[in-house]
Amino acid sequence: MSSRFRLFSIGLLAAVLAVLAAPSFAYDWQKFAPKNAGFSVDVPCKPEFSSRHLKNAVGYAWLCTDEKNQFIVMAGTSDFYGPAVDTNEMFSQFEAGFLDSVKGKETSNKRASFRGADGKKLPASIFTFTAGDRLGVFEMVMDGNTMYVIDVGWRKGFNVAKVRKRVMTSFKLLPRTRPPEPQEPDVANEEKKSQ
């Protein structure tokens, strides 16, 4: 075998291995703007919906991950009912709760501003974190008693910079009608129905 052919073969093999080892950025990108969620964002996968109802708060989240589980994207809206919330306290509590739930550790944190749907500057908080074999960036934006969040997490060792950048820079707030406060379920009647 000639040395030129051997160099070509080695180069071709290296190129194939590089393509196979590198994450694919040929994702099926879509503009995602759930009805009355108050935001839009470009996502590279189909989001799945979840919600959580707590006393005086309702949270809605949409999550998606790629087929190889290299990254996860989460966007959401939380409405807090009752007295006005303290923005800095809410940022601190939400970050602590998130980090606790993923058993993570903050690696950086900064306060910022974010353009609201009406163009006004809203308070925002951005933090980066590690959690096991994952890294991530999480942004929270407060508009009165409503919080909007966007998060991109990825496995260490995978270069998802293009995904992260596109998701985070495409996140925009949209006009929204805040839903009325949910009514407390009638526990006594629910128990009677189940008996």
Image: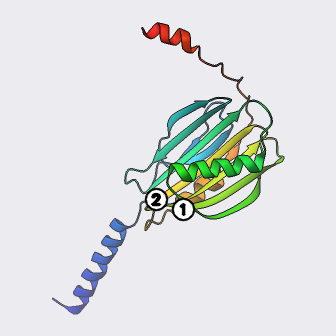
76 lies left or right of 9: right
Q: Secondary structure at mark 1?
A: helix
Query: Horizontal and vertical percent for residue 154?
Result: 48, 59
Q: Local crowd at mark 1 within 10 Å, few (<14), some, or many (≥20)?
A: few
Residue under circle 1? 162
Q: Is residue 159 visible?
A: yes
Task: Point out which mark residue 25 bears.
Answer: 2
Q: Amino acid at mark 2?
A: Phe
Q: Residue at x 66, y 37 (%)?
A: 78
Q: Residue at x 66, y 22 (%)?
A: 182
Q: Amino acid at mark 1?
A: Lys
Q: CA distance from mark 1 to mark 2?
A: 8 Å
Q: Looking at the figure, which quarter contains the N terminus?
A: bottom left
Q: Residue at x 42, y 8 (%)?
A: 195
44 lies left or right of 91: left
Residue 61 appears in which quarter of the rendering?
Answer: top right
Q: Secondary structure at mark 2?
A: loop
Q: Are marks 1 and 2 in contact (CB under 8 Å)?
A: yes
Query: Horizontal and vertical percent for residue 57?
Result: 66, 32
Q: 22 and 180: which one is in front?
A: 180
